[in-house]
Image: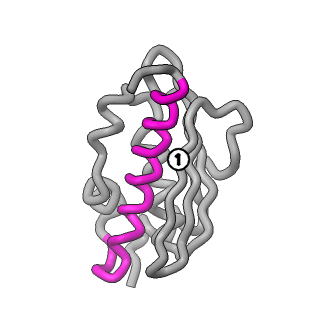
């Protein structure tokens, strides 16, 4: 059902945990499947300097969270805001159709974290 890249990110997720000094936090969840995701970003000079996540959910949700953190580290905030659910799924080498919503959660959590950062720093 899952390809090797998805399985690797599920079995060995990158950037797991809470950033205690996060500049922005994004949360999202799916009533459909019960998955929840929290994404933390640390920003310096308008770039995502560090990122981590906490996800409660299926393998695809955890893999999507892990992949997203690798995709955004070092990106400017405006670049990171352009990342879509399809971008996350593509970087994972694809997800089964019934699991595509998991990549939505990752992209949504990222966008929410950036919006949270901008609200806190009057950049809205």
Magenta span contains residue 36: no
**Residue 3 or residue 40, whichever sits in front:** 40
Q: Name the residue located 33 percent from the left edge and 82 percent from the top edge.
A: 98
Q: Name the residue located 59 percent from the left edge and 45 percent from the top edge.
A: 52
Q: Give the crowd class for mark 1: few <14, some 14-19, many >=20 residues within 10 Å.
A: many
Colour scheme = one colour
- Provide residue 9's location: percent of width, then percent of height: 51, 62
Magenta span contains residue 106: yes
In the rendered view of the protein, which quadrant contains the C terminus?
A: top left
**Residue 3 or residue 113, whichever sits in front:** 113
Q: Name the residue located 73 percent from the left edge and 37 percent from the top edge.
A: 20
- Provide residue 35's location: percent of width, then percent of height: 54, 72
- Provide residue 103's location: percent of width, then percent of height: 38, 63
Which residue is the extreme one toward the right? 20
Question: In the drawing, does residue 91 fall left or right of residue 116?
Answer: left
Q: Quadrant of residue 105?
A: bottom left
Give the residue pinned by disc 1: 26
Q: Is residue 13 above or below residue 46?
A: below
Q: How many marks?
A: 1
Q: Name the residue located 38 percent from the left edge and 74 percent from the top edge.
A: 3
In the rendered view of the protein, which quadrant contains the N terminus?
A: bottom left
Stretch of the chain drawn in magenta: 95-120
- Provide residue 94's location: percent of width, then percent of height: 29, 68
Q: Is residue 45 above or below residue 55?
A: above
Question: In the drawing, does residue 82 fall left or right of residue 14?
Answer: left
> What secondary structure do most residues of the magenta stretch adopt?
helix
**SS for callout 1:** strand
Which residue is the extreme one toward the top? 45
């Amino acid at each position: 059902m899952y390809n090797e890249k998805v399985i690797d990110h599920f079995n060995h997720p990158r950037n797991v945990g809470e950033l205690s000094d996060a500049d922005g936090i994004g949360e999202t969840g799916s009533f459909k499947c019960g998955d929840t995701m929290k994404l933390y970003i640390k920003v310096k000079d308008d770039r995502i300097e560090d990122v981590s996540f906490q996800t409660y959910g299926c393998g695809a949700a955890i893999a999507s969270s892990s992949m997203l953190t690798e995709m955004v580290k070092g990106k400017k905030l405006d670049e990171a805001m352009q990342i879509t659910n399809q971008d996350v799924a593509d970087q994972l080498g694809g997800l089964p159709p019934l699991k595509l919503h998991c990549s939505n959660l990752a992209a949504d959590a990222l966008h929410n974290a950036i919006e949270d950062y901008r609200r806190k720093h009057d950049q809205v």
